[in-house]
Image: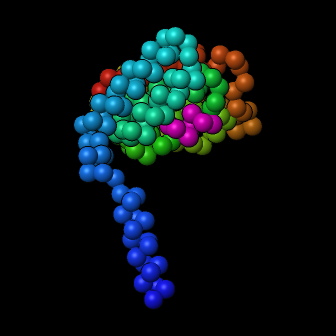
Amino acid sequence: MKKTMFILMTLVALAGCQKPETQQAPTMDQRKDIGHKLILKSLNDLQNKDLKSTIIDLQTSIQVNPSEPEAYLLLGQILLKVQEFGHAADILDLAAKTFPDNGTVFYMLSIANKLAGKKLPAVLAARHSVEVFQAQQDRDNMLKSAALLHELIDIPDDQFTPAKQPDAASAVPGPASGGND
């Protein structure tokens, strides 16, 4: 009898926790639209020099629509700018797993790992970036990625340390953003 009463009470409690039928999860198109609007808002926040809101908007955009590489790339660049190299590398590593055919993601991941003082991950990301751009026949970005790869390989292991310059991230050139999704 106690088991039956417990099951009945549990069912009643669960029934009260269900969403009303008018509240449905947003469709993929709605999620993409919301994510895009958050990216646009983040750009406006960035223009107003509100980095905290920019970061929050981009993180939310990624949560709402994880299929948009631009949000990851922008967030990674902002985190590099504020010298959160490890956090930038984590975000860009997630993007690399989500978008394995995006050369720009791997290029930026290499930069983030370089600035975080992680040589092997930086080299591997740069190498993959070269391969992706080469497969896409994007010669300019392939050459930029190859230059980064050579730069990383030429740095002796004992001299590979995290960046400490105040504007190290702002001076980092990146590949062109077209044609690498």
**Residue 130 is drawn in which quadrant?**
top left
Placement of 93 over or under 6, stated as above or below:
above
What colour scheme has been applied to the protein in the rendered image? rainbow
Which residue is located at x 26 percent, y 42 percent?
27
Q: Residue 132 in the image: x percent, y percent?
A: 36, 37
Which residue is located at x 52 percent, y 38 percent?
91
Quadrant location of the N terminus? bottom left
What residue range appears in magenta? 86-92
Queried whether the magenta region covers residue 123, the answer comes back as: no
Which residue is located at x 72 percent, y 24 percent?
164
- Magenta span: chief secondary structure: helix
Quadrant location of the C terminus? top left
* Residue 17 visible in image: yes
Q: Residue 47 in the image: x percent, y percent?
A: 49, 11
Residue placed most toward the observer, 56 or 119: 56
Placement of 131 over or under 43, stated as above or below:
below
